[in-house]
Image: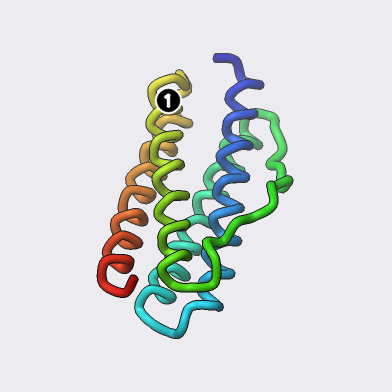
């Protein structure tokens, strides 16, 4: 895979992390001050850190991070819907990162993606636990 293709993929990842950050932070404000809102806020901060790591990889390879994102879906205004949406987002990212780790030949990129993948799995677990308990 050439450098331009890696940058394109990393930019898609960057936008996914940007969208997750915006969804989670918005949902945090709509959830009653409770355990799920605190967990969602903390995970939103993790997603911002993922953006930083991805932007670093992009710029090291001569690219520029893009901020163009699609219209966001938040999962509604109730706790159950928001948590279900957040679980779906994490699940999609987990599958995407697994595939990328198998196909990208750049060891630095793969190392970062493996770390992000591990965190995304933890995020999904945290959201699933909150859905089971509160949803």
Q: Secondary structure at mark 1?
A: helix
Quarter of the picture holding the C terminus: bottom left
Quarter of the picture holding the N terminus: top right
Q: Is residue 91 left or right of residue 78?
A: left
The location of residue 49, given as percent across then percent down, is 51, 55
Q: Nearer the viewer, residue 94 or 4?
A: 94
In the image, residue 72 above or below residue 15: below
The location of residue 77, given as percent across then percent down, is 54, 72
The location of residue 79, given as percent across then percent down, is 44, 72
Q: Residue at x 37, y 37 (%)?
A: 114
Q: Residue furthest top?
A: 1
Q: How is the image coloured?
A: rainbow
Q: Residue at x 55, y 42 (%)?
A: 54
The location of residue 105, given as percent across then percent down, is 45, 18
Q: Nearer the viewer, residue 52 or 128?
A: 128
Few, some or many C-alpha atoms within 10 Å of disc 1 (few <14, some 14-19, many ≥20)?
few
In the image, residue 118 above or below residue 73: above
* Res 94 seen here: yes
Q: Nearer the viewer, residue 42 or 31?
A: 31
In the image, residue 96 above or below residue 43: above
Total marks shown come to: 1
Q: Residue furthest bottom?
A: 33
In the image, residue 27 above or below residue 94: below
* Res 52 seen here: no
Q: Nearer the viewer, residue 70 or 75?
A: 75
Q: Residue at x 32, y 66 (%)?
A: 131
Q: Is residue 129 left or right of residue 33?
A: left
The image quarter in which residue 22 lies: bottom right
What residue is disc 1 on? 107
Q: Residue at x 38, y 49 (%)?
A: 120
Q: Is residue 121 left or right of residue 51?
A: left
């Amino acid at each position: 895979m050439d450098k331009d293709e890696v940058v394109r993929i990393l930019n898609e990842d960057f936008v996914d992390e940007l969208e997750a950050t915006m969804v989670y932070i918005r949902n945090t404000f709509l959830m009653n001050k409770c355990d799920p809102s605190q967990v969602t806020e903390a995970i939103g901060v993790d997603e911002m850190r993922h953006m930083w790591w991805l932007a670093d990889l992009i710029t090291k390879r001569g690219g520029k991070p893009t901020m163009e994102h699609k219209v966001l879906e938040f999962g509604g205004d109730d706790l159950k819907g928001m948590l279900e949406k957040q679980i779906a987002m994490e699940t999609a990212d987990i599958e995407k990162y697994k595939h990328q780790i198998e196909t990208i030949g750049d060891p630095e990129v793969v190392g970062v993606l493996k770390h992000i993948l591990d965190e995304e799995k933890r995020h999904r677990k945290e959201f699933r636990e909150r859905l089971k308990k509160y949803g």
